[in-house]
Amino acid sequence: RKEVEQDPGPFNVPEGATVAFNCTYSNSASQSFFWYRQDCRKEPKLLMSVYSSGNEDGRFTAQLNRASQYISLLIRDSKLSDSATYLCVVNSGSSASKIIFGSGTRLSIRP
Amino acid sequence: NAGVMQNPRHLVRRRGQEARLRCSPMKGHSHVYWYRQLPEEGLKFMVYLQKENIIDESGMPKERFSAEFPKEGPSILRIQQVVRGDSAAYFCASSPEGLGTQYFGPGTRLLVL
């Protein structure tokens, strides 16, 4: 089992729709969690950290479920510019090698 | 405030040549991380450095690969005697504190012919 798993997609949704995807992790001792977005052939950019109580940033909501070991990202009122690959990042320990990137979920927003 | 800078952005090498990838962290950041990304795959950790120190190189192949972050100048990822399997995007990230939030450079795309 991979340490961090994401549905690769693609998720193809119409503009204005709400879309959500999850990321599961295997290490129950994982401490911190992030969502990054990566546009085609570009670098990953931090979208938001994920806090235990859940957090919201505009149209984006991130949640953590420690019992089931997954994090989620919800995007409301999706825009064409939201089309990208969304990477889940899990920090499972106290070393850089324990910062694990998921392979990403590809999202495509159609007009 | 300039972000993380990497150069070259694209690098073409023939098998057996050396590749040198450079990364200048964000101003005020003294922690640098190197990752490799193959098409349709996630980023794979290679090495974590602070100024003049390699903190964690557990993700870096034991042979042909080396990294440094000197007191002055950029961090360098060096690949000797490149092979076709080294073709990938190499991203550098920096953080202001150890294992803090990472900010990525634009990457270097290495193509080995």
Image (cartoon, rainbow, N blue to C red):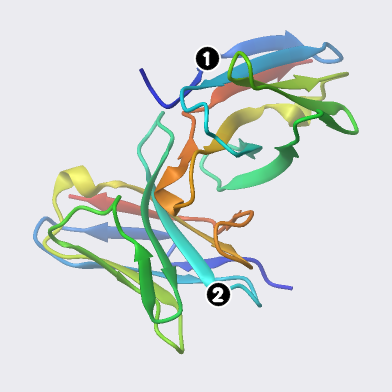
Label 1 sits on residue = A7
In this orientation, which residue lies closer to the viewer: B58 or B68? B58
Q: Is residue A100 left or right of residue A44?
A: left
User: Which element type, helix, strand or loop, lies under badge 2?
Assistant: loop
Q: Mark 2 lies on which chain?
A: B
- Asked if residue A77 is positioned above or below residue A35 in the image, the reply reads above
User: Which residue type does callout 1 highlight?
Assistant: Asp
Image location (x, y in percent) of residue A52? 75, 31
Locate the C terminus of chain A and report the quarter of the image it occupies: top right
> Mark 1 against mark 2, which lies toward the viewer?
2
User: Which residue type does callout 2 highlight?
Assistant: Ser
Image location (x, y in percent) of residue A35? 65, 35
Taking the image as drawn, is residue B39 in sight? yes
Disc 1 to disc 2, how far (Cα)?
Answer: 34 Å
Residue in view at x 61 percent, y 30 percent: A86
Residue in view at x 42 percent, y 27 percent: A3
In this orientation, which residue lies closer to the viewer: B58 or B40? B58
User: Which element type, helix, strand or loop, lies under badge 1?
Assistant: loop
Label 2 sits on residue = B30
Q: Are marks 1 and 2 in contact (CB under 8 Å)?
A: no
